[in-house]
Amino acid sequence: MADEEESKASKFNIGDVLLAPAYGNLEKPFTGQVEKIYENALLVEITENDPSDQPTVNEMNHRAVVRMDEIEVIKHAPAPEKKADVEE
């Protein structure tokens, strides 16, 4: 099971720039940057949006949770270096 989680998480990295579809009260797709990775969703900071959606984006504090299978990655962030296990 850990292998499944690792492979799913490896598709996305903190800092990836993505295009997400409209959802909820947002009427147009938006661009954002990944802040946190969940099991099937991503917490995204909204960086670009349609001006008509600006009041909604402000209410959402420029954050949205989007499903992984609904987004398109525009630019991948550098993959984080894996930390070696250190014994104390």
Image (spheres, rainbow, N blue to C red):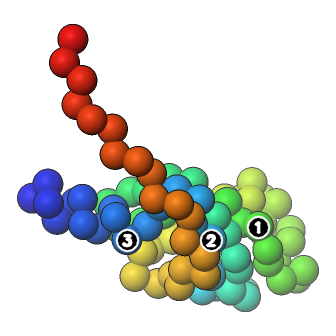
Q: Residue at x 74, y 59 (%)?
A: 62
Q: Amino acid at mark 3?
A: Lys
Seen from the viewer's position, the closer of residues 60 and 42 is 42
N-term mark: 3 or 2? 3
Q: Residue at x 79, y 77 (%)?
A: 49
Seen from the viewer's position, the closer of residues 62 and 59 is 62
Within 10 Å of disc 3 (Cα), the crowding (few <14, some 14-19, many 20+) is: few
Query: Secondary structure under badge 2?
Result: strand
* Residue 10 place in picture, x, y as percent: 34, 64
N-term mark: 1 or 2? 2
Mark 1 vs mark 2: in front: 2
> What quarter of the picture does the N terminus occupy?
bottom left
Quadrant housing residue 53: bottom right
Q: Amino acid at mark 1?
A: Thr
Say if 82 sits above or below 25 in the image: above
N-term mark: 1 or 3? 3
**Is any atom of residue 34 visible in this view?**
no
Task: Kindly check if marks 1 and 2 are in contact, taking CB atoms under 8 A apart as contact.
Answer: yes
Distance from the alpha carbon under mark 1 to that under mark 2: 9 Å
Seen from the viewer's position, the closer of residues 50 and 18 is 18
Within 10 Å of disc 2 (Cα), the crowding (few <14, some 14-19, many 20+) is: many
Which label number is shown at residue 17?
2
Which label number is shown at residue 47?
1
Distance from the alpha carbon under mark 1 to that under mark 3: 21 Å
Residue at mark 3 = 11
